[in-house]
Image: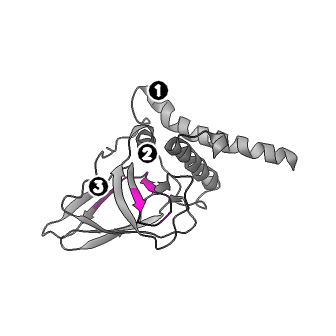
């Protein structure tokens, strides 16, 4: 039992470091910003093209990564629009809600017919390790696009095929847990020992 207690921090650190390395090594070896074979363009700005985000609320009360929020996007215009939500876009809890902000780590590009609303559940990750996990029904607001190392990490994660949930594969829990710990370390600029 004593040995497993010493092994757990090591495993958490190892998983987190592997996640960070998966995002940085391809650009070091290939000289580019993305892993080999990636051709999809990653948007750098929020592009709603006349559409509006009417509602953002938490849909999960125990997850810190994955589809944690639900967004309703409306096209009030008379023609179809394409809305793009970029990786690195941050969502903040509403006034008086002491929960974590979330960051989009899988880009959303959606066609919205004229006069209609669509509901999307994007893939986000919590970015404030010292705050509470989002509660079901909590209101959120669209914030800024993050910057610096956190934006670089978000763009890297945007190019990865991430598990749909912690049960979607035998290693999904470890993969997502490693990503979450790595994001907290980068976002909060803290060491793995402080998590």
Numbered circle sitting on residue 58:
none
Q: Is residue 50 left or right of residue 138?
A: left
- Which of the two residues, 170 or 97, is positioned nearer the viewer here? 97
Labels 2 and 3: the sequence-earlier one? 3
Q: Nearer the viewer, residue 114 or 70?
A: 70
| The residue stretch that appears in magenta | 91-110
**Separation of marks 2 and 3 at Cα, in angstroms:** 15 Å
Q: Is residue 39 above or below residue 177?
A: above
Q: Is residue 186 left or right of residue 31?
A: right
User: Residue 22 appears at what percent x and percent y?
Assistant: 53, 37
Q: In this picture, is 104 found above or below 139?
A: above
How far, Cα to Cα, is label 1 from label 3? 28 Å
Residue depth check, mark 2 versus mark 1: number of the one nearer the observer: 2
The reply to whether callout 2 and callout 3 are in contact (CB within 8 Å) is no
Vertical comparison of 153 with 89: above or below: above
Marking on residue 28: 1
The tag earlier along the polypeptide, 1 or 3, is 1
Residue at (41, 25) in percent of width and height: 31
Q: Residues within 10 Å of mark 1 (few under 14, many from 20)?
A: few
Report helix, strand or loop for mark 1.
helix
> Element type at marker 2?
helix
**Horizontally, is 153 left or right of 82 in the view?**
right
Q: Mark number for residue 84? A: 3
Which residue is painted at 47% across and 25% down in the image? 29
Q: Which residue is mark 2?
A: 154
Residue sitting at the far front: 96
Indicate the secondary structure of the residue bearing disc 3. Answer: strand
Do the residues under discs 2 and 1 have CB atoms within 8 angstroms? no
């Amino acid at each position: 039992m004593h040995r497993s207690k010493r092994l757990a921090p090591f495993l958490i650190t190892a998983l987190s470091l592997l996640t960070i390395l998966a995002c940085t090594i391809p650009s070091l070896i290939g000289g580019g910003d993305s892993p080999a074979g990636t051709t999809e363009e990653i948007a750098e700005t929020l592009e709603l093209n006349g559409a509006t985000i009417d509602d953002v609320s938490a849909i999960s009360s125990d997850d810190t990564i994955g589809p944690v929020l639900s967004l309703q996007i409306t096209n009030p215009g008379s023609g179809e629009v394409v809305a793009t939500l970029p990786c690195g876009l941050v969502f903040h809890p509403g006034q008086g809600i002491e929960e974590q902000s979330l960051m989009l780590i899988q880009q959303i590009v959606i066609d919205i017919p004229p006069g209609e609303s669509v509901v999307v559940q994007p893939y986000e990750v919590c970015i404030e390790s010292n705050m509470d996990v989002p509660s079901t029904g909590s209101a959120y607001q669209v914030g800024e696009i993050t910057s610096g190392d956190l934006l670089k990490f978000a763009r890297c994660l945007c190019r990865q095929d991430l598990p749909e949930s912690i049960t979607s594969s035998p290693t999904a829990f470890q993969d997502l847990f490693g990503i979450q710990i790595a994001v907290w370390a980068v976002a909060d600029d803290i060491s793995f020992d402080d998590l």
